Amino acid sequence: MAETINLAILEDHQATIDGYIHRLSDYTNINIVGTCLFSECLKTLLNKQPIDMLILDINVPISKENRNIQPIHQLLSELKSSYPNLSILVISMHSQRAMIKSILESGTSGYILKDDYDSIRNLGKIIETLAEGGSYMSNRVRDIFFNGHAADFTLTPRELEVLSVCAAYPDESTAVLAERLDIANPTVRNFLHKIYLKLQVHGRAAAILKAQEMGLIPSITPNQDS
């Protein structure tokens, strides 16, 4: 492939970023234009120049000051809306079927598990495949997605987005959450009410905890690879 692929990386472990850069060093057609350790810098990076592909981890903190995890479903929704031509490759340790299903159905191009060393070794070829409009999943991701017997989650993508924002900002009021989601305060309350009913819980904290236990939204795992 002769055409240059402009690539950005959002990953909160510098050693992991360095590993990706090393894997891609022999691919002269892949131009790594920038990396982010925190999600708050991603839009600035994406707006600096055209970017074709983004490697994205799920458990990335919002900022150095706010160590809460970026609400992944909201981020993916914003990326697909603002950068419709951007291909997204998720590389994560998350292997729960509900998470995999929601991520893949959000329009991402691929999903690789971090312990899938064969895929990581072939990262350059995978990026070239995705740049040509293809898709890619780790074999175990494919097995989980197509052959898993766990019950499918019942929350809609929008409900997952609302709940992931609640998890990222657990102490904020529904009014502030409504501003972050760019919807009316009563709409947030309606979403939360439906979420509580579906998850059979009585409050926001319980809903976040249950959704994390079910693998619907990521949970914070300090000092571990995400």
Image (tube, rainbow, N blue to C red):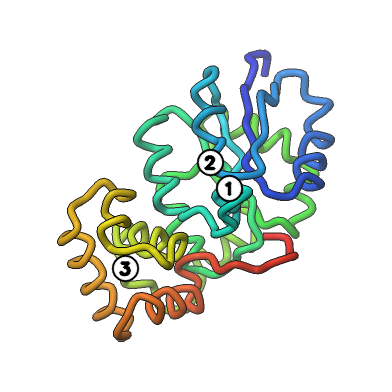
Q: Find numbered disc 1 in the image and state the secondary structure of the residue it sits on.
A: loop
Mark closer to the chain start, 2 or 1: 2
Q: Quadrant of the N terminus?
A: top right
Residue 31 quadrant: top right
Residue assigned mark 1:
63
In this picture, residue 181 sits left or right of residue 24: left
Q: Is residue 55 above or below residue 189?
A: above
In this picture, residue 136 sits left or right of residue 161: right
Q: Is residue 73 above or below residue 217?
A: above
> What is the total number of numbered labels drawn onto the structure image?
3
Q: Is residue 44 above or below residue 190?
A: above
Mark closer to the chain start, 3 or 1: 1
Measuring from the top left, give residue 18's x and y in whole percent.
Answer: 81, 39
In the orientation shown, which residue stands out farthest toward the left? 186
Measuring from the top left, give residue 165's x and y in whole percent.
Answer: 40, 58
Q: Find numbered disc 2 in the image and state the secondary structure of the residue it sits on.
A: helix
Proximity of marks 3 and 1: CB atoms separated by less than 8 Å: no
Q: Find numbered disc 3 in the image and state the secondary structure of the residue it sits on.
A: loop
Of residue 90 and residue 1, the one placed in the foreground of this image is 90
Proximity of marks 2 and 1: CB atoms separated by less than 8 Å: yes
**Amino acid carrying mark 2 in the image:** Glu
Tell me which residue sits at (66%, 61%) in the image.
Answer: 93
Tell me which residue sits at (31%, 68%) in the image.
Answer: 155
Residue assigned mark 2:
40
Of residue 164 and residue 76, the one placed in the foreground of this image is 164
**Amino acid carrying mark 3 in the image:** Leu
Q: Which mark is residue 155?
A: 3
**Amino acid carrying mark 1 in the image:** Ser
